Image (spheres, helix red, strand yellow):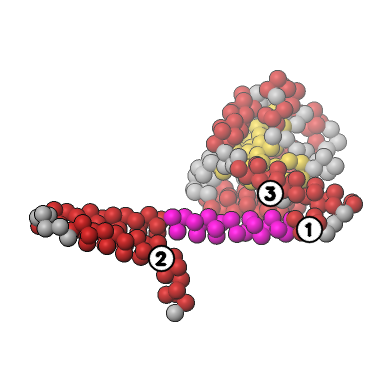
């Protein structure tokens, strides 16, 4: 019974329109001067008009319902935010406002095809991407953070192990650029850095070293760390924690074609400025 009432509520306009239209048609058809062909045409146009009205009404109903369902969560979130701000004051209000502003910035980024990720989410997403990459896919990576992080940070150690296992099982073509001062290869931590590079090379990861002094003319954005899966055009960027340079502060999944092309161009620019392999004392297998 409720469904019948709902149907009548939603389609009362068509029912009334059809009744009025049929009455008008009946009045028009009453005069005797109309022949059978004219009557048939009137009936045909009446039926077509009624069907079109029903289709348009159905389309408008579906569109309105879709918009309503989509906007309902937004209205709910808006009321939650309004209520939370109304119940806070002083320092709590300022902190809540900061959180909302940051969320708005994230929404602007998402609209532009950039999805902010927390460090744990960043590593989970990138692990999923490498596990599902097609065999023999190309993966381009740039690392501008301290190379010692590959020894000190548990996530980076896991990421390197994952690289090794994936190359072994699926034969991915991974190419990584390290950006750091080559003089560090002869510093007190030089042996550790060389071991990091050797670990990569031993597992068939192509390694390049770029001196940051030689790429200063290219602009700061060329040093952005990222991992690009060229088969799917998924770009993952990470930003180091300034307090702890070996750790990732936040990450991003980038699906914006223009930004991906820019990262590809940056990678090629870095390759053209790489240090000759014979300058640092680690065999790269080339």
Q: Which residue is mark 2?
A: 12
In the image shown, does 27 or 99 lie closer to the viewer? 27
Q: Is residue 49 visible?
A: yes
**Residue 190, label in figure:** none
Instruction: Where is residue 182? Give x, y as percent.
Output: 76, 28
Q: Which residue is mark 1?
A: 84
Magenta stretch containing residue 223, yes or no? no
Position above or below: 43 against 255 = below
Residue at the far top in the pictured view: 217
Of the image marks 3 and 1, the number of the one nearer the N terminus? 1
In the picture, the quarter occupied by the N terminus is bottom left
Q: Residues within 10 Å of mark 1 (few under 14, many from 20)?
A: few
Q: Residues within 10 Å of mark 3 (few under 14, many from 20)?
A: many
Residue at the far right in the pictured view: 90
Q: Secondary structure at mark 3?
A: strand
Q: Tell us which disc is closer to us: 3 or 1.
A: 1
Q: Which residue is mark 3?
A: 117
């Amino acid at each position: 019974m409720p469904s019948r009432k709902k149907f009548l509520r939603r389609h009362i306009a068509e029912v009334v329109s059809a009744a009025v239209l049929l009455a008008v048609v009946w009045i028009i058809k009453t005069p005797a001067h109309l022949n059978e062909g004219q009557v048939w045409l009137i009936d045909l146009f009446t039926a077509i008009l009624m069907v079109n009205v029903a289709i348009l009404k159905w389309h408008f109903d579906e569109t309105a319902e879709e918009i309503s369902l989509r906007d309902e969560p937004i209205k709910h979130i808006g009321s939650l935010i309004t209520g939370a701000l109304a119940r806070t004051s002083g320092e709590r209000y300022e902190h809540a406002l900061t959180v909302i502003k940051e969320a708005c910035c994230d929404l602007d980024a998402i609209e532009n095809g950039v999805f902010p990720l927390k460090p744990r989410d960043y590593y989970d997403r990138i692990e999923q991407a490498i596990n599902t990459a097609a065999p023999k896919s190309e993966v381009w990576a740039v690392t501008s953070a301290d190379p010692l992080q590959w020894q000190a940070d548990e996530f980076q150690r896991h990421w390197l192990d994952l690289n090794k296992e994936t190359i072994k099982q699926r034969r991915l073509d991974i190419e990584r650029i390290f950006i750091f001062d080559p003089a560090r290869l002869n510093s007190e931590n030089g042996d550790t850095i060389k071991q990091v590079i050797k670990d990569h090379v031993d597992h068939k990861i192509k390694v390049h070293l770029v001196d940051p002094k030689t790429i200063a003319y290219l602009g700061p954005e060329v040093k952005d760390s990222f991992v690009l899966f060229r088969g799917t055009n998924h770009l993952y960027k990470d930003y180091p924690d300034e307090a702890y340079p070996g750790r990732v502060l936040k990450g991003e999944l980038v699906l914006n074609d223009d930004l991906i092309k820019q990262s590809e161009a940056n990678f090629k620019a870095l390759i053209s400025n790489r240090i000759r392999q014979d300058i640092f004392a680690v065999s790269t297998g080339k």
